[in-house]
Image (cartoon, grey):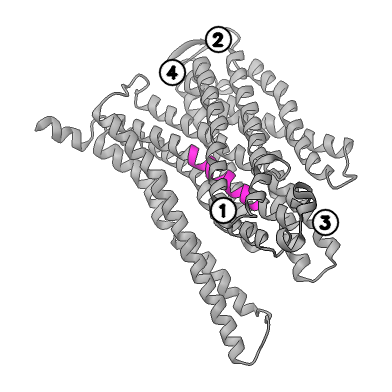
Amino acid sequence: NVGDNVGDIAGMGSDLFGSFAGSVCAALVCCAQSPTLHKSWDMTMVPLVIAAGGLVACVVSCVLCLALFGVREEADVEVLLKRQLMGASIISTPILILICYMYLPAAGFAVRGKSGVMWWHLAICCVNGLYSGLIIGVLAEYYTSASYTPVRRLAVECKTSAATNIIQGLALGYKSCIIPVTLVGATVWVNYTLARFLGISVGAIGILTTLASSLTIDAFGPITDNAGGLAEMCQMPDYVRDRTDVLDAAGNTTAAVGKGFAISSAMLVALGSFGAYAQTKSLIDAPMIGAFQFMGLIFGAVVPYWFFALTMESVGVAAGAMVEEVRRQLEEKRANGVNGAPDASAEDCDKCIAIATNASLYEMVAPGSLIVLSPLGVGYVFGAEMLCSFLLGAVVCSATMAVSASNTGGAWDNTKKFVKCGGLQEMLGDEYDVKLHGKKSDTHKNAIVGDTVGDPLKDTSGPALNIVMKLMAMVALVFAPSIPTKGLIEHFVTKA
């Protein structure tokens, strides 16, 4: 329960708020570099006003949904959560358009690389980002919810073995990348065409205008999951656990929507920060063909895999230490004559929490250093142009890996819950046997193996790749004034 609170609420909250701050900062930098917008404080601050407008829309949507709709049966829980998010998106649309109309010059304005940008161009960029994020969230739900075919297909594969479950789950994750990444690519093309990098940054803000609603429904899952765990530990009646499982299933679906928002916003935030860096270094028209550029793309594509491996290893190390501590406690109690499943003392719990906490701090030193130092090393050693290609390679690779890992892990999690609650009975009909396909059966155990593999994918390495995209681009932007046009290697090659 402690881990759920830290990982699913604090972790996802910090990720989404980091994207929110990064998108606003990137847009503010682009506004400050605009030949027109920087002359007026109101026009320069328009990204903050857009963000505030989205907050108003979320509050209105929450009040309306609670007043107009209620929960009369189990299926209404998930529907009400979705209505709140979709309502916030619909209400945000006219607010965003009105803000752009009121705060931007009617005669048009110029941004770095383009003149004649109209207020409605930026409004289209906002709305484009808003609905792209919503669609990506819905797609994440399709691939991870037990209500749809992909997860149910995984549940059937669990009849065979854990291996087939894992193989099909990996295929599901890879397939789930196609439409979201294509959609983000189309969003980037439209927004860049209309308003260059300012359009991309504002598109990221558009995705996050419904942040308050998406974070609220994202927190619903771990809260209900904790409630179910408490009900089980307190040995409450079975119907209590059944009700918390219904709430938890709805929460898992909405959590997938939240992860979709986080990944799509991270991609646009990273590209917006990259654009601000490129504008700061006057690299808008920099060539992408060259030895250093190709090398930068390859180096950038390697970094997410390196980071992914480090975080997965960290989970394995921490899990191994936790298992050894639990074994030690059990052996110690059995040596003292305690049989069965002994209750853990406060001291025993503290030791386990200390292992997880220490691991979360010490094991992140290497991955964190990699993300902060790698763009600086590339920039100072190889120069500003190679850093551009390095960042692009890292963003593209991180985006596909993040979508795949998050959706694969989410699908395995809901597959386990689907098998546990007897969902295969509807699919198998007369062939269904509780001992073969229900709770504690081999099918259920195969689903648990997939969920165990998927947890670090969807809760650790996958979401952490959002930070890789954003932080590398932000580090490059912050240190842009000190990064040389030609790095040490290029100076050495020129002299040679």
Q: Are marks 4 and 3 in contact (CB under 8 Å)?
A: no
Query: Outermost residue, top direction?
Result: 107
Three-letter code, disc 2: Gly
The residue mark sitting in front, 2 or 1, is 1
Vertical arrangement, residue 454 with respect to residue 171, above or below: below
User: Label 4: which residue?
Assistant: 112
- Residue 126: x and y in percent read 61, 23
Disc 2/disc 4 C-alpha distance (Å)? 14 Å
- Residue 146: x and y in percent read 71, 46
- Of residues 323 and 89, the one nearer the viewer is 323
- Indicate the quadrant where residue 390 lies: top left
The secondary element bearing badge 4 is classed as loop
Is residue 205 located in the magenta-colored stretch of the structure?
A: no
- Residue 401: x and y in percent read 48, 42
- Residue 284: x and y in percent read 37, 21
Q: Are marks 2 and 4 in contact (CB under 8 Å)?
A: no
The residue sitting at 55% across, 9% down in the picture is 108
Residues drawn in magenta: 400-413
Q: Earlier in the sequence, mark 2 or mark 1?
A: 2
The secondary element bearing badge 1 is classed as helix
User: Label 1: which residue?
Assistant: 454
Is residue 403 located in the magenta-colored stretch of the structure?
A: yes
Three-letter code, disc 1: Gly
User: Label 3: which residue?
Assistant: 243
Q: Residues within 10 Å of mark 4 (few under 14, many from 20)?
A: some
The residue sitting at 49% across, 38% down in the picture is 400
Q: Is residue 237 left or right of residue 357?
A: right
Task: Indicate which disc residue 108 carries.
Answer: 2
The residue mark sitting in front, 4 or 3, is 3
Vertical arrangement, residue 231 with respect to residue 74, above or below: below
Q: Quadrant of the N terminus?
A: bottom right
Task: Indicate which disc residue 326 carries.
Answer: none
